[in-house]
Image (tube, rainbow, N blue to C red):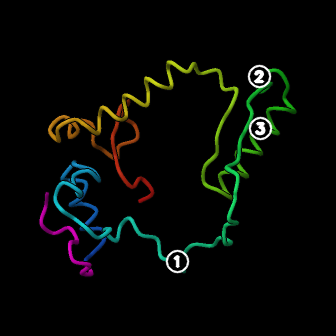
Amino acid sequence: MPSDLVQNGSVCDIEKELQAFDESKAGVKGLVDAGIIKTPPFFVVLESEVSCQPSPAHFHIPVIDLKGIHEDDVRRREIVEQMCNASETWGFFQVVNHGISKNVMEGMVQGVKGIHKEKNEVKMEYYTRDTKKKVTCTSNSLL
């Protein structure tokens, strides 16, 4: 793990830090394995930069039902609008009636867990920010 990653909350050049993080190709688990106990600044969004209302004590994650998406153009536009609204408001949503089997979804979860359990040398083969590659592994993809 490169030594120029933030360890004690010191202020560093975030781009340099992110580059060091990427070059390590070890991901967040690499930070944990290296003993980092403070969140690196490139993962932090300042409260002043976040515009959101306080969350109610009990909130509901938006659920988008894809039933009928291929049967009706009006329904399709409704679904797309729901996705846009959920993305803008919440940043995520749950999708139901997507047609993906439970076995495929469970296999995908196992695959994700499996890559995180691999040795760094194996993960390094896939770690990239190049979105044109078919298979990638990255962290903090907002930057």
Percent coordinates x, y for residue 70 in the rendering: 77, 22
- Is residue 39 shown in magenta? no
Q: Which residue is mark 2?
A: 70
- Asked if labels 2 and 3 touch by Cβ distance under 8 angstroms, the answer is no
Q: Is tag 1's residue or tag 2's residue first in the polypeptide sequence?
A: 1
Q: Amino acid at mark 1?
A: Glu
Residue 7 or 129: which is nearer the viewer? 7
Quarter the N terminus occupies: bottom left
> Residue at (20%, 61%) from the top-left corner?
20
Q: Secondary structure at mark 3?
A: helix
Find the magenta span and give its range: 1-11
Position of 107 relative to 74 (above/below): above
Residue 20 or 61: which is nearer the viewer? 61
Position of 124 relative to 96 (above/below): below
Residue 49: image quadrant is bottom right
> Residue at (22%, 49%) from the top-left corner?
26
Task: From the image, give the main secondary structure of the stretch colored magenta.
Answer: loop
Q: Which residue is mark 3?
A: 79
Badge 1, how many Cα within 10 Å: few under 14, some, many 20+? Answer: few
- Asked if labels 2 and 1 touch by Cβ distance under 8 angstroms, the answer is no
Q: Secondary structure at mark 1?
A: helix
